[in-house]
Amino acid sequence: MNILDLQLPNKSSDYQILIGNGLLLDVNNFLPVIKGQQVFIVSNETVAPIYLEHLKKTLSQFEIHSYILKDGEKYKSLSSLEDILDSMLNSGLRRNATLIALGGGVVGDIGGFAAAIYQRGINFIQVPTTVLSQVDSSVGGKTAVNHPLGKNMIGAFHQPVRVITDLYTLKTLSNREFLAGIAEIIKAAIIADRQLFYWLENNSESILAQEIETLSTMIHASCSIKAKIVCLDEKEQGVRAWLNLGHTFGHAIERVLGFGELLHGEAVAIGIVMATEYSVRLGLLSSSESEAVRRLIQRFGLPTTLDSMNFRVSASDLVSAMALDKKNVDADLTLILPKAIGKVTIRNNIKTQDVEQFIEQFLEFKT
Ligand SMILES: NC(=O)c1ccc[n+]([C@@H]2O[C@H](COP(=O)([O-])OP(=O)(O)OC[C@H]3O[C@@H](n4cnc5c(N)ncnc54)[C@H](O)[C@@H]3O)[C@@H](O)[C@H]2O)c1
Ligand SMILES: O=C(O)C(=O)C[C@@H](O)[C@H](O)[C@H](O)COP(=O)(O)O
Ligand SMILES: [Zn+2]
């Protein structure tokens, strides 16, 4: 088992990320961080039938309650959140209970948000079961639900007390979801680890074959990047915004198409290509590095254009959605732009008209 320590400026919220095989089955991974006698597990209708009984058995010494969410991004909503909170109250959950989010990023984000606001905040553990949630969403304490007008618009920072990443759970993940998670790993490499970028290129065959040793190395490397950035800037006052590379475009795509039409990782893959090409347009990045990014994304079977997924959107709709992005300061857009593979910069004061013109050209482009 690998252990990553996430050390936040506020010492009392430091926590560990455990990464290994079969961790779900060992109560000792949970015991040090469970408070009280009550455990409330949030999962969904796909993950629960496979893993919920195992987890309940592991935690059989506790009083266990659970809530099973419908599957899909569209259920990361205020209305589902209300149902979860109703269920917590109906279960007689006390303030010293522990909530466990068992599932992918949707379950982790909404479950974490429920833990953040239930009786003003309770203990919570992330048990991520997708590549994406193991390398990204389970770490860092961003919890939220979507609003029809934008991604993650209603949420809170609420750190888990532990992240328990059981690599065995990936065995049941669909290939499309597996690949979507790789998009956030490519993102992490472009942000901060040039070596990881070329490692992904050189090990793509083994990754695509889902060889467990390779996956373990990859998940550990990518998760460490996220943990380091979060330690520097927990509440996104500065460098944490790097983690939003590809997301200004990606979130707008998700919202304009309708949540769940494209997977988050797929929208981020297209968003990364758009951000790198916009970076070339501004003269910040060489076209050869931008091409290398596009090639790596394609290598993992991820989309690089909306056209390749048979989706049609207008530049003006995308820009209107981007205007609501949480990073924006005043009327202009803020974008995270690569300067080289392994280095990004935060650019404020980007004019919406320029981005709209860029998107029009981008949407014309066919691979
Ligand atoms: N909080 C953050 O920092 C952060 C970071 C990145 C993404 N996110 C959010 O995470 C969400 C995307 O997460 P995701 O990609 O995990 O999507 P997801 O939670 O929808 O899971 C993907 C699919 O895989 C299924 N699944 C999960 N684990 C499985 C398993 N082990 N075996 C079989 N099926 C399994 C799910 O039921 C779902 O159908 C988005 O809402 C995104 O906004 C949040
Ligand atoms: O942890 C972060 O910070 C991120 O930006 C990670 C992203 O991959 C993730 O999708 C996050 O939920 C986006 O946050 P948001 O603040 O743009 O909603
Ligand atoms: Zn993301």
Image: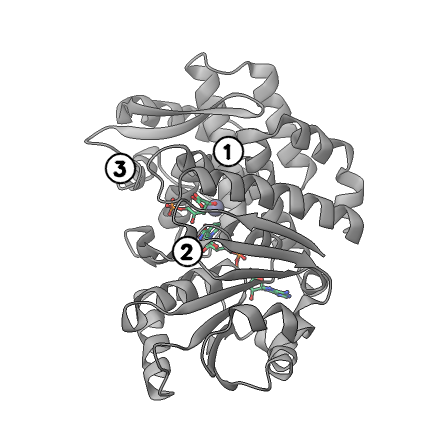
Question: Which residue is pictured at 37% across the width and 29% down the height?
Answer: 335
For mark 3, give the secondary structure: loop
Measure how far apart labels 1 and 2 are at the Cα level: 35 Å
Measure how far apart labels 2 and 3 are at the Cα level: 36 Å
In the displayed structure image, the side of residue 282 where residue 120 appears, left or right:
left
Residue 175, horizontal then vertical, whole percent: 68, 55
Dot 1 or dot 2: first in sequence order is 2
Dot 2 or dot 3: first in sequence order is 2
Dot 2 crowding, Cα within 10 Å, few <14, some 14–19, many 20+:
few
**Residue type pointed to by label 3:** Ala
Give the farthest residue toward the front: 11
Residue 211 shows in the view: no
User: Which mark is nearer the camera, 1 or 2?
Assistant: 2
Q: Which mark is residue 166?
A: none
Task: Residue under label 1, please give it.
Answer: 272
User: Which mark is nearer the camera, 2 or 3?
Assistant: 2
**Residue type pointed to by label 2:** Ser
| Image quarter (top left, top right, bottom left or bottom right) of the C terminus | top right
Question: Which residue is pictured at 61% across the width and 49% down the height?
Answer: 4
Question: Which residue is pictured at 61% across the width and 79% down the height?
Answer: 49
Closer to the camera in the image, 125 or 219: 125
Residue 10 shows in the view: yes
Q: Is residue 262 above or below residue 84?
A: above
**Residue type pointed to by label 1:** Ile
Residue 330, horizontal then vertical, whole percent: 19, 31
Task: Residue under label 2, please give it.
Answer: 12
For mark 1, give the secondary structure: helix
Task: Residue under label 3, please give it.
Answer: 323
Closer to the camera in the image, 62 or 70: 62
For mark 2, give the secondary structure: helix
